[in-house]
């Protein structure tokens, strides 16, 4: 195989050392006319795995061989990336590039981009994932061929004499596969092999020929694992899978596997370099079962939530049940085999709260109830499965975070119902957005409250200063109280703009400023319109007069925002 015919690279199967060596070579070749530095040794690289310096830029590369990415639940991996990034900033790079063996998910890409800090606004952050590495590798086939030379030699030797018997059609290929399958079926009386090929990889599945195959000819798999400190999350996931069967699939990369053996029929053998071990459930066609969780605190039910029991697992210490709620929240509960312990170390996956407001509100309520509860009762198809006493650290989720989401989604639900609009829930919710949503909800609910804007108020008023001495004083800079109404007022909540009106405004201390217009001669002339401006530090209140509530004294009912961790000004 010539250099120009190099095969596609399975970056995730290279192993950490080979991956890093290959990326180092590609960077050196890609930037061969620049100053390239590859520090000797990992861990002591001061946040630099490779760097490229030009007259105008200084680029730092950071390698992370995370074969299954760094999703939200892999907190230690994200912390590693964050730590490496902060260390790299000490060298004042113009560009910082994260190099990983796979492509990022939207959530992972957003996490990397959010590493940007206000102290380094001009720093460019990017990711070299599988697609970018493929592009770079395609430009340097000699590098690829160098690293694949052993594989190419084996393939060449295996193909000697085969070209004369090469298949000529899909029918020919099918016939050969059928012959191989028939041969595989004769290798053992109790077991056979199913097989498939995708790309350059072969997959074998051991299948029993009869129901008692595991009794007559048992198959045992032996694993010796060693998880380095940076794989603490994977170690925890493996322990829960091994002990309780939590998780339908788990992938163990080669660098954590110290030993692997299969004991069983003689035809079973493991050859070649191990790239990873994947353990997954057999296909289960059974329907999910209805479930209910009752959250209990102080001997009373604080919440009842309906969902589906999607999976049951078995491990060496007990069983597990995995529940799904509102298509966003997943809950995995281990149950000891002897039921001697009533404490559950719960695994909670909240998913991404960027759905509609109603679903997000239900999900956030569930998350908060689970976090605050003392006891959980689990019912499957109407029968109580177990009662779990929650540990104080059972749920690692931030309760305040879910309280914020619950309150915000409640406000959005109310606004959508009142106005017949669809606002939705953004992935990031700022304090200002929360204040706007609560303020809009309050005025729609009949209260006067503070307007969320503290800057000059962008409302133009038609006026005639000669008819009103108070307005003349306000135009000259003297503050007065002012109440006025606009037919329409637009506000932005998240990425949605909504129009309200008519809306009334009131401020106890207001000044006015003439609006100027340019003439054809480029001169500015004052108009009969003014811009409303509140005095520094003074609030502007607003309300919808047609639906205003009244307090017990007959005055306009007012309300503070009462938004968690947001101060009213």
Image (cartoon, rainbow, N blue to C red):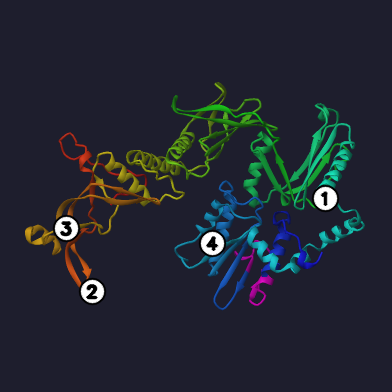
Pointer 1 with pointer 3, Cβ within 8 A: no
Q: Which mark is residue 409?
A: none
Q: Residues within 10 Å of mark 3 (few under 14, many from 20)?
A: few
Q: CA distance from mark 1 to mark 2?
A: 79 Å
Closer to us: mark 3 or mark 2? Answer: 2
Which of the 4 image quarters holds residue 513?
bottom left
Identify the magenta region. 28-50
Q: Is residue 54 above or below residue 559?
A: below
Q: CA distance from mark 3 to mark 2?
A: 23 Å
- The percent coordinates of residue 159 (x first, y second) are 88, 57
Among the two numbered marks 1 and 4 on one chain, the one whose residue lies closer to the N terminus: 4
Q: Is residue 520 above or below residue 403?
A: below
Does residue 202 appear to the left or right of 312 in the view shown? right
Q: Which mark is residue 462?
A: 3
Q: Is residue 25 above or below residue 409?
A: below
Q: Which mark is residue 169?
A: 1
Does residue 139 appear to the left or right of 207 in the view shown? left
Q: Is residue 36 magenta?
A: yes
Question: What residue sits right under mark 2 in the picture?
Answer: 520
Q: CA distance from mark 1 to mark 4?
A: 56 Å
Among the two numbered marks 3 and 2 on one chain, the one whose residue lies closer to the N terminus: 3
Among the two numbered marks 4 and 2 on one chain, the one whose residue lies closer to the N terminus: 4
Q: Residue at x 70, y 46 (%)?
A: 252
Q: Which mark is residue 86?
A: 4
Which of the 4 image quarters holds residue 408?
top left
């Amino acid at each position: 195989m010539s250099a120009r015919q190099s095969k596609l690279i399975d970056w995730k199967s290279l192993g950490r050392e080979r991956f890093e060596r290959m990326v180092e070579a590609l960077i050196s070749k890609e930037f061969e006319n620049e100053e390239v530095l590859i520090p000797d040794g990992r861990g002591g690289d001061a946040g630099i795995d490779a760097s490229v310096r030009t007259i105008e830029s200084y680029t730092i590369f950071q390698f992370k061989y995370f074969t299954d990415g760094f999703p939200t639940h892999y907190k230690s991996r994200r912390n590693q990336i964050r730590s490496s990034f902060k260390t790299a900033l000490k060298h004042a790079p113009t560009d910082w590039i994260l190099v990983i063996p796979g492509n990022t998910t939207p959530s992972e890409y957003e996490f990397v981009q959010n590493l940007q800090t206000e102290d380094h606004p001009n720093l460019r952050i990017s990711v070299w994932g599988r697609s970018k590495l493929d592009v770079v590798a395609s430009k340097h086939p000699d590098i690829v061929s160098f690293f694949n030379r052993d594989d190419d030699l084996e393939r060449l030797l295996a193909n000697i004499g085969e070209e004369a018997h090469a298949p000529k059609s899909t029918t020919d290929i099918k016939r050969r596969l059928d012959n191989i399958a028939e041969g595989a079926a004769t290798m053992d009386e109790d077991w056979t092999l199913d097989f498939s090929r995708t790309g350059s990889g072969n997959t074998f599945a051991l299948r029993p020929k009869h129901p008692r195959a595991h009794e007559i000819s048992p198959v045992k798999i032996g694993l010796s694992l060693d998880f380095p400190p940076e794989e603490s999350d994977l170690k925890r996931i493996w322990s829960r899978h091994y002990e309780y069967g939590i998780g339908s699939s788990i992938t163990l990369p080669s660098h954590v596997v110290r030993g692997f053996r299969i004991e069983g029929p003689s035809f079973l053998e493991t050859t070649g370099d191990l790239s990873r071990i994947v353990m997954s459930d057999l296909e289960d066609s059974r329907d999910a079962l209805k479930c209910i969780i009752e959250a209990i605190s102080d001997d009373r039910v604080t919440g009842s939530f309906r969902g589906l029991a999607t999976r049951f697992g078995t491990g060496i210490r007990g069983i597990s049940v995995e529940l799904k709620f509102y298509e966003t929240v997943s809950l995995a509960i281990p149950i000891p085999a002897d039921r001697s312990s009533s404490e559950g170390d719960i695994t909670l996956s909240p998913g991404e709260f960027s759905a509609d407001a109603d679903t997000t509100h239900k999900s956030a309520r569930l998350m908060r109830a689970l976090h605050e509860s003392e006891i959980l009762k689990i019912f499957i198809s109407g029968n109580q499965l177990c009662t779990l006493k929650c540990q104080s650290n059972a749920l690692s989720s931030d309760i305040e975070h879910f309280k914020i989401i619950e309150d915000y989604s409640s406000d959005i639900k109310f606004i959508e119902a009142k106005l017949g609009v669809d606002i939705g829930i953004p992935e990031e919710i700022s304090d200002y957005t929360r204040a706007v949503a609560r303020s809009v909800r309050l005025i729609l609910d009949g209260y006067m409250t503070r307007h969320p804007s503290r800057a000059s108020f962008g409302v133009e008023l038609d006026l005639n200063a000669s008819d009103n001495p108070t307005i003349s004083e306000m135009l000259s800079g003297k503050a007065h109280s002012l109440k006025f109404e606009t037919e329409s007022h637009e506000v932005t909540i998240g990425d949605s703009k909504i129009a309200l009106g008519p809306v009334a405004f009131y401020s106890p201390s207001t000044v006015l400023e003439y609006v100027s217009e340019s003439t054809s001669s480029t001169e500015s002339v004052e108009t009969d319109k003014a811009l409303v401006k509140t005095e520094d530090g003074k609030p502007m209140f607003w309300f919808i007069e047609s639906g205003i509530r009244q307090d017990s004294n007959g005055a306009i009912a007012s309300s503070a925002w009462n938004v968690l961790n947001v101060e009213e000004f």
